[in-house]
Image (cartoon, rainbow, N blue to C red):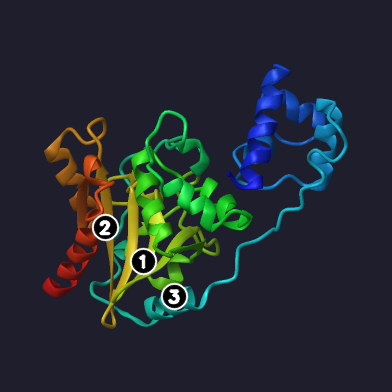
């Protein structure tokens, strides 16, 4: 069973298409912006009571179809384990000085801001084979609308990346907002639209205590490098035995990772350790343990 937030978003999108309305036309009829309609349809945010009432009138639905749903706003409170992870990340000493201080103005334009999939976790079902991971997560968080709203807003460029983070979520990682300055991320993460560094915003990340590793896991964030703006598949800030390091995980799909030398230049440009995982190995139960062992090796060799 999908969470109510996703069910409402899917029903709204289906009804709009039945009436042959575009998002822009619907926004004009309701009296809101097209971007707001898009966010509600993708389950990035819950509809306001006013917006839900206007949809019922426009779609000629029974009163209460949308307005009977009351969604919680904001992010969930941190669990004790997540608080411990954040404290360890703040207190750990960086293995290397912040690489972002060496950055010059990029010589290339920003990455395409439309890069990524808009589909929420629930959209993995049609035509994909996520196994039973998605069903397990839905049973664990059937009414956790705050979690699903944040999960739907994450960026991906493949369903393979979603399946990988599903495994991390099932292991107890909490999805919440994490400020880059709080944990001193070595990469200079910036807004994908403006290219400006984040100052106050705390983008969504998974906080995870994996045995002796404390991890803040950021999927698909825009990074400023000396040669341009990049979109690493996964950027992680990891604390281990009182030290911390930023690493990158790349999922090597056959479509996007063809040129070996180009990939090596890209890795050097990021300036942090990069782990490449074959897309066919993502569903292997040993994939995450091997990746965590590689992270420990990076600390030992630093």
Q: Secondary structure at mark 3?
A: helix
Q: Residue at x 44, y 69 (%)?
A: 181
User: What is the C-alpha distance between the residues marked 1 and 2?
Assistant: 22 Å
Tag shown at residue 288 = 2
Q: Which mark's residue is nearer the viewer, 1 or 3?
A: 3
Check the picture and name the quadrant holding the N terminus.
top right
Residue at image mark 1: 185
| Label 3, residues with CA under 10 Å away: few <14, some 14-19, many ≥20 | many
Residue 256 percent coordinates (x, y):
26, 34
- In the image, residue 139 lies at what x, y percent? 53, 53
**CA distance for labels 1 and 3:** 12 Å
Mark 2 or mark 3: whose residue is earlier in sequence: 3
Q: Earlier in the sequence, mark 1 or mark 3?
A: 3
Q: Residues within 10 Å of mark 1 (few under 14, many from 20)?
A: many
Q: Give SS at disc 2.
A: helix
Q: Residue at x 22, y 51 (%)?
A: 269
Instruction: Give percent across and percent down for residue 219.
Output: 40, 52
Q: Secondary structure at mark 1?
A: loop
Residue 272 visible, this orientation: no
Look at 45% across and 44% down and name the residue there. 155
Quadrant of the rendered image containing residue 110: top left
């Amino acid at each position: 069973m999908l969470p109510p937030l996703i069910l409402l978003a899917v029903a709204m999108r289906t009804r709009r298409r039945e009436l042959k309305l575009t998002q822009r036309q619907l926004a004009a009829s309701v009296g809101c912006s097209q971007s707001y309609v898009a966010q509600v349809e993708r389950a990035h945010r819950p509809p306001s009571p006013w917006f839900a009432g206007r949809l019922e009138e426009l779609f000629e639905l029974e009163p209460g179809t949308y307005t009977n749903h009351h969604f919680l706003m904001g992010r969930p409170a941190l669990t004790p384990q997540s608080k411990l992870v954040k404290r360890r990340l703040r207190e750990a000493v960086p293995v290397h000085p912040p690489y972002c201080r060496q950055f010059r103005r990029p010589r290339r334009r920003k990455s395409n801001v439309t890069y990524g999939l808009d589909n929420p976790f629930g959209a993995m079902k049609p035509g994909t084979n996520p196994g039973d991971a998605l069903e397990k997560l839905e049973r664990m968080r059937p009414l956790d609308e705050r979690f699903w709203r944040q999960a739907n807003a994450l960026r991906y460029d493949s369903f393979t990346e979603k399946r990988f983070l599903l495994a991390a979520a099932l292991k107890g990682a909490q999805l919440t907002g994490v400020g880059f300055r709080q944990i001193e991320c070595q990469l200079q993460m910036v807004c994908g639209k403006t290219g400006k560094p984040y100052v106050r915003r705390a983008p969504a990340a998974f906080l995870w205590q994996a045995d002796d590793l404390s991890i803040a896991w950021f999927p698909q964030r825009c990074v400023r490098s000396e040669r341009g703006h990049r979109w690493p598949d996964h950027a992680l800030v990891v604390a281990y035995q009182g030290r911390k390091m930023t690493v990158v995980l790349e999922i090597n799909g056959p479509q996007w990772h063809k040129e070996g030398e180009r990939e090596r230049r890209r890795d050097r440009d990021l300036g942090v350790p990069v782990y490449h995982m074959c897309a066919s190995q993502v569903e292997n139960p040993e994939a995450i343990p091997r990746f965590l062992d590689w992270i420990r090796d990076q600390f030992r060799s630093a």
